Image (cartoon, helix red, strand yellow):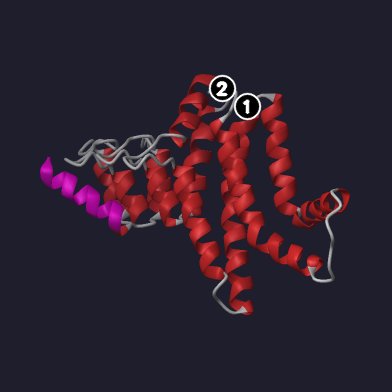
């Protein structure tokens, strides 16, 4: 049995789908079996960013809410490493399998808010990583800034896409309105900047010729951070919780 487990973990890490399928379909390993550190095959596949293995394991009953000895779920691992496609796969897999089962949806949303030994949720880990990258972007040249900002926006767009279905199924009408507002502000940052300028004028603040340029810079730097903060607030206060 131990030899089968070793082969299983190796197959998960190396994307050996043929061996993986043989071991699972012949009952040589349990897809949710864990090692002495409470790590499942899904944990190992996510660590290696093996999207094909993650897809296979999820389709064959792997439980993405299992926690290792550090209270990390596969979702935590994917989030902290920026594996946004795997984050999306895990969340969308649960949504597809659970359909409109409210009890299961509550369980999955709560798993998104599960905290590791450092008291971080998966979204907070993703948030911290993205915000660190934002700070690093500011020190690079303009061309590289644009490339990296585009990458961050695409990654955040994947996270938003993964969360939308859960808010629609499990959230209140107010939650859904908040989600739509978050999406709108993310996709239309110039409108938010315009509102900031209008508020500044209404408050009687003195504007100078550089304020528009400064607001444009602020929009580039802060739109991602603001969206992340809004998502954290929304998920932390979903009506179902």
Image-based side of 46 in relation to 107, left or right: left
Mark 1 falls on what kind of element? loop
Mark 2 falls on what kind of element? loop
Image location (x, y in percent) of residue 11:
26, 53
* One can see residue 164 in this view: yes
In the rendered structure, find residue 99 and report the number of the disc placed on it: none
Figure quadrant of the N terminus: top left
Residue drawn at x 61%, y 46% as measured from the top left? 160
Residue stretch rendered in magenta on the structure? 1-13
Q: How many numbered badges does the structure rendering display?
A: 2
Residue drawn at x 84%, y 71% as measured from the top left? 209
Residue drawn at x 84%, y 63% as measured from the top left? 207
In the rendered structure, find residue 240 and report the number of the disc placed on it: 2
Residue drawn at x 49%, y 34% as measured from the top left? 94
Image location (x, y in percent) of residue 81:
41, 56
Q: If you read the primary sequence from the N terminus, does the residue marked by circle 2 or circle 1 appear first?
A: 1
- The local crowd at label 2, few if under 14, some if 14 to 19, many if 20 or more residues have their Cα within 10 Å, is some
Residue closest to the far left: 2
Does 27 sit above or below residue 22? above
The kind of secondary structure the magenta stretch mainly shows is helix
Q: Nearer the viewer, residue 126 or 5?
A: 126
Does 36 sit above or below residue 239? below
Image location (x, y in percent) of residue 171:
63, 27
Distance Cα–Cα, label 2 vs label 1: 6 Å
* One can see residue 85 in this view: no
Does residue 148 show up magenta in the picture? no
Does 57 sit above or below residue 17? above
Does residue 6 show up magenta in the picture? yes
- The local crowd at label 1, few if under 14, some if 14 to 19, many if 20 or more residues have their Cα within 10 Å, is many
In the rendered structure, find residue 171 and report the number of the disc placed on it: 1
Image-based side of 115 in relation to 13, left or right: right
Is the Cβ of the residue at disc 2 closer than 8 Å to that at disc 1?
yes
């Amino acid at each position: 049995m131990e030899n089968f487990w070793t082969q299983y973990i190796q197959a998960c890490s190396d994307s050996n789908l043929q061996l993986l399928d043989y071991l699972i379909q012949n009952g040589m390993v349990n897809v949710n079996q864990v090692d002495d550190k409470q790590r499942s095959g899904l944990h190992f596949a996510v660590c290696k960013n093996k999207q094909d293995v993650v897809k296979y394991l999820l389709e064959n009953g792997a439980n993405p809410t299992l926690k290792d000895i550090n209270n990390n779920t596969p979702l935590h691992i994917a989030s902290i490493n920026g594996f946004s496609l795997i984050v999306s796969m895990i969340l969308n897999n649960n949504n597809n399998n659970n359909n409109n089962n409210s009890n299961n949806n509550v369980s999955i949303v709560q798993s998104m808010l599960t905290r590791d030994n450092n008291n971080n949720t998966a979204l907070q880990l993703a948030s911290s990583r993205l915000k660190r990258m934002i700070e690093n972007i500011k020190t690079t040249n303009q061309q590289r800034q644009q490339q990296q900002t585009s990458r961050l926006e695409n990654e955040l767009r994947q996270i938003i896409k993964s969360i939308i279905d859960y808010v629609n199924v499990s959230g209140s009408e107010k939650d859904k309105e908040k989600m739509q507002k978050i999406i709108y502000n993310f996709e239309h940052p110039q409108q938010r900047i315009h509102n900031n300028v209008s508020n500044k004028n209404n408050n009687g603040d003195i504007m100078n010729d550089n304020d528009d340029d400064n607001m444009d810079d602020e929009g580039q730097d802060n739109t991602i951070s603001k969206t992340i903060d809004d998502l954290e607030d929304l998920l932390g206060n979903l009506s179902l919780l």
